[in-house]
Image (spheres, helix red, strand yellow):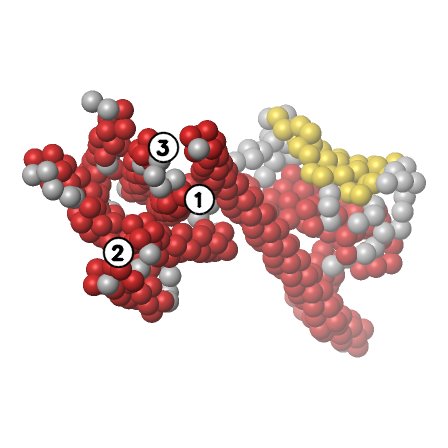
């Protein structure tokens, strides 16, 4: 088996760590982070589906990946929207992304391939919101120990994952034609996915500790 | 072409790694910044709480002093004057009418009771706010206080050393109140036979030591939260004095108060 493929499998399996933590505290998750459990549940399903499509049926599985990315964007945007009082702004963001994705589906030739493939619009919006959350946390000073706040880890996971993804897609466009370099570059989203899952796991673990200490 | 591609790939990897590293460092800096701000905020809140607490203590002490002065003045001017007038009238009656037998006894008893009442009013009034304080200052007031208590169930010894300072402001009054409280505690709770009040003046500070041969005291939470100890500690905090329990045994106790002479 090739190393990139092995890394991809290993990184995909990492979702089990936060998933187990989410299952353990399924009903105890506070409303502000509870949508995360659905994302973690969908992630392995999407991976299995993608693997089945490519290995068993030998057909393109990009569509499943795109749908998962959209679900991930929706869930994260919803989680972040709960942190702010201005819900309208999030509705506008969501509408822009939905319209953009529909436009990409209907008129793929009118949109640069880079923007379609990288989910650049989704990424930029989430990066912006993550930074806004960091700013908000710093201004409000709500808790004594910030590292115990699950939303901090979710924000950092989002910022890290989407910044890395954006960088990978931009670089892949730059390295177009160099198949070998590209194959190694494409390992990076898996690594980013692994880090994201670990950060989600930390968020859920912090929540578990919080619930346990409050009992 | 192939060489160029390799260097480009290396560059991209370096840039990417740097970017991710910067993100991680940024995250760590964020947490550090947050904690720092949090501590600053807490410190600010703590200082504000302390200031508020001090203000409340000052207000309470001020209002207590004002109330004491008012009650003392009322006692002295109103009841004291009335009793004095009553005494004069009865004395006049005694001179005008020739009492004999039971009437004379009753007259003498009334005069004695009036004398006692006048003395009591004067004593209570003095204890509330010593008249001498404004005229003779802290040292004389403490001396007077000790003299008044001396021989009434216990021996109270007053000692003074160093170059005495005429001191009669609010801080001096607080020192007087602390001494009053300490001596009263020794009388009431420590069952002391001998109480010694020492004043030691120096250029920078005044050391006041109140010692006794009583049974000592237990400084538990109940005592700490009690009005007496609360008054002593708050007043000493207010004037920036240092309170030290030098000795506390079943054979006696000694408490030292060091008051800086400049606030």
The outermost residue toward the right is: B163
Rendered image quadrant of residue B61: bottom right
- Which quarter of the rendering shows the N terminus of chain B? top left
Residue drawn at (72%, 55%), measured in percent from left and top?
B127
Q: Residue B130's x, y, as percent?
A: 77, 57
Residue A146, which numbered label? 1
Category of crowding for the residue at label 1, using alpha-carbon neighbours closer than 10 angstroms: few (below 14), some (14–19), many (at least 20) = many
Q: Which residue is mark 2?
A: A74
Kind of element beneath mark 3: helix
Category of crowding for the residue at label 3, using alpha-carbon neighbours closer than 10 angstroms: few (below 14), some (14–19), many (at least 20) = some
Please tell me whether mark 1 or mark 3 is closer to you in this view.
Answer: 3
Rendered image quadrant of residue B135: bottom right
Q: Is residue B114 visible?
A: no
Residue A181, which numbered label? 3
Please tell me whether mark 3 or mark 2 is closer to you in this view.
Answer: 3
Q: Which chain letter matches label 2?
A: A
Counting residues from the N terminus, which is met first, the one under dot 2 or under dot 1? 2
Q: CA distance from mark 2 to mark 1?
A: 25 Å
Q: Is residue B186 visible?
A: yes
Q: Marks 3 and 2: CB-CB under 8 Å?
A: no
Residue drawn at (34%, 51%), measured in percent from left and top?
A114
Q: CA distance from mark 3 to mark 2?
A: 32 Å
Rendered image quadrant of residue B39: top right
Residue drawn at (56%, 35%), measured in percent from left and top?
B219
Left or right: residue A135 compared with residue B100 = left
């Amino acid at each position: 088996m090739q190393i990139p493929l092995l890394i991809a499998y290993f990184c995909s399996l990492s979702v089990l760590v936060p998933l187990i933590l989410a299952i353990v505290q399924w009903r105890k998750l506070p409303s502000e982070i509870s949508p995360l459990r659905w994302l973690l549940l969908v992630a392995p399903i999407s991976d299995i589906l993608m693997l089945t499509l490519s290995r068993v049926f030998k057909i393109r599985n990009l569509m499943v990946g795109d749908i998962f990315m959209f679900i991930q964007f929706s869930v994260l945007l919803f989680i972040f929207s709960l942190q702010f009082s201005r819900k309208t702004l999030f509705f506008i963001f969501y509408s822009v992304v939905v319209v953009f994705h529909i436009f990409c589906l209907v008129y793929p030739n009118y949109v640069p391939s880079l923007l379609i493939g990288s989910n650049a619009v989704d990424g930029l919006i989430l990066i912006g919101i993550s930074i806004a959350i960091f700013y908000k946390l710093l201004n409000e000073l709500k808790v004594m120990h910030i590292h115990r706040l699950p939303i901090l880890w979710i924000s950092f996971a989002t910022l890290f994952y989407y910044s890395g993804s954006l960088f990978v897609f931009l670089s892949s466009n730059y390295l177009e034609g160099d198949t070998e370099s590209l194959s190694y570059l494409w390992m990076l989203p898996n690594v980013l996915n692994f880090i994201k899952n670990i950060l989600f796991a930390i968020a859920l673990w912090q929540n578990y500790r919080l619930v346990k200490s409050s009992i | 072409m192939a060489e160029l591609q390799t260097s480009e790939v290396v560059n991209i990897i370096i840039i990417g790694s740097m970017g991710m590293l910067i993100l991680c460092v940024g995250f760590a800096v964020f947490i550090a910044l947050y904690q720092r701000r949090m501590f600053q905020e807490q410190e600010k809140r703590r200082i504000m709480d302390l200031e508020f607490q001090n203000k409340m203590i000052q207000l309470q002490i001020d209002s207590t002093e004002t109330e004491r002065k008012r009650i003392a003045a009322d006692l002295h001017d109103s009841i004291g004057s009335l009793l004095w007038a009553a005494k004069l009238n009865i004395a006049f009656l005694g001179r005008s009418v020739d009492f004999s037998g039971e009437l004379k006894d009753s007259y003498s008893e009334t005069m004695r009771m009036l004398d006692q009442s006048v003395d009591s009013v004067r004593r209570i009034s003095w204890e509330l706010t010593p008249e001498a304080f404004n005229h003779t200052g802290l040292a004389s007031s403490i001396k007077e206080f000790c003299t008044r208590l001396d021989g009434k169930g216990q021996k109270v010894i007053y000692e003074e050393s160093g170059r005495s300072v005429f001191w009669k402001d609010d801080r001096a009054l607080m020192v007087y109140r602390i001494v009053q409280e300490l001596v009263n505690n020794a009388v009431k709770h420590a069952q002391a036979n001998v109480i010694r009040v020492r004043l030691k003046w120096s250029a920078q500070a005044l050391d006041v030591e109140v010692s006794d041969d009583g049974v000592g005291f237990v400084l538990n939470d109940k005592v700490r939260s009690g009005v007496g100890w609360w008054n002593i500690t708050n007043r000493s905090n207010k004037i920036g004095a240092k309170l030290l329990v030098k000795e506390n045994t079943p054979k006696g106790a000694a408490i030292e108060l060091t008051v800086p002479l400049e606030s």
